[in-house]
Image (cartoon, rainbow, N blue to C red):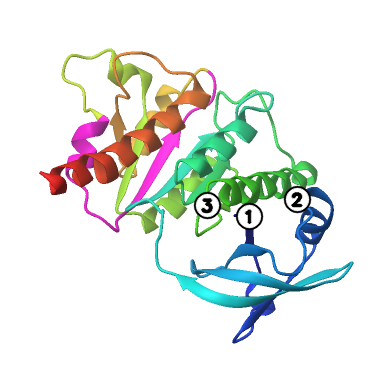
Amino acid sequence: MQRYFVPEENWYPESVTISGDDVHHINRVVRLREGDKIICSHPAGHAARCTITFVESDNVHVTIEEWLESSVELPLEVTIAQGLPKGDKLDLIVQKGTELGANAFIPFQAARSVVKWDDKKLQKKVERLEKIAKEASEQSHRNLIPLVETKTSLSELIEVSKQYDIKIFAYEEEAKTESYQSFSTILQGMEVGQKLLVLIGPEGGISGEEAEQLKASGFHPVRLGPRILRTETAALYTLASISYHFEELRWNECQQ
């Protein structure tokens, strides 16, 4: 069943009005008609099964049939702070990270980022990433669309990090030591509902100066396994690990 995220102002007590690009998708791509069922998601994280009642060129009107109680959101609120990578890697990180349950993404300019975002590019880039996140949320039946924030410097990111319960950064040098701190150790000390900020460096990783700055700001350096991961792999590794630890592993324990 197709899922669409609808702005709050388009919700009414018993109906919803869909507008914008989603109208084209309904009319021209999946070709839905009156009587067809869809799921509409509210920005607050609620979702309802709806029936299409009237289709126009600019709007699709639906009736709310049933509110859905199930949620597929991660038990932790996880934000991925990603040092700007080359090419279209950030698109992949946002798309797959959304599917894996990330709550937000913060692209930032790291010391070793080859890519540079100026003010002219910033808004256009963010709008593209927001669209990718929305489409990935619909595909994976998320209840929420991850935020894509615009903090572009490490200092801005450190200021924002004060809002989080736990802050970690993947550090290549940590993987080379014998007395390293593993990601699993951090997860074992966390509780459902806490906010976790995961910082991933670009190609080349986090510089030594950045690492010291992050440690001084309360970030924990962690090892993401014994192998050195590509920047586009690291964020997905963390999200998959969180899902296994808080969803699959605990679910299995409850069944025993």
Give the image location of residue 91, x and y in percent.
64, 34
Residue 128 in the image, given as x and y percentages of width and height: 72, 45
Tell me which residue sits at (59%, 46%) in the image.
139
Quote the CA–CA distance across marks 3 and 1.
9 Å
Counting the numbered discs, the total is: 3
| Quadrant assignment for the N terminus | bottom right
Distance from Cα at disc 2 to Cα at disc 3:
17 Å
- Answer yes or no: is residue 116 visible: yes
Badge 1 density bin: few <14, some 14–19, many ≥20, Cα 10 Å:
some
Q: Residue at x 49, y 19 (%)?
A: 230
Give SS at disc 2: loop
Please tell me whether mark 3 or mark 1 is closer to you in this view.
1
Residue, disc 2: 30
The answer to the question of whether label 2 and label 1 lie on touching residues, with beta carbons closer than 8 A, is yes
Q: Nearer the viewer, residue 196 or 34?
A: 34
Q: Residue at x 76, y 69 (%)?
A: 34
Query: Is residue 184 part of the magenta span, yes or no?
Result: yes
Taking the view exactly as shown, the residue that stands out farthest to the left is 256
Mark 2 and mark 1: span between their CA atoms? 9 Å
- Label 1 belongs to which residue? 2
Q: Which residue is mark 3?
A: 141
* Picture coordinates of residue 78, whole percent (x, y): 40, 48
Magenta residues (range): 183-203
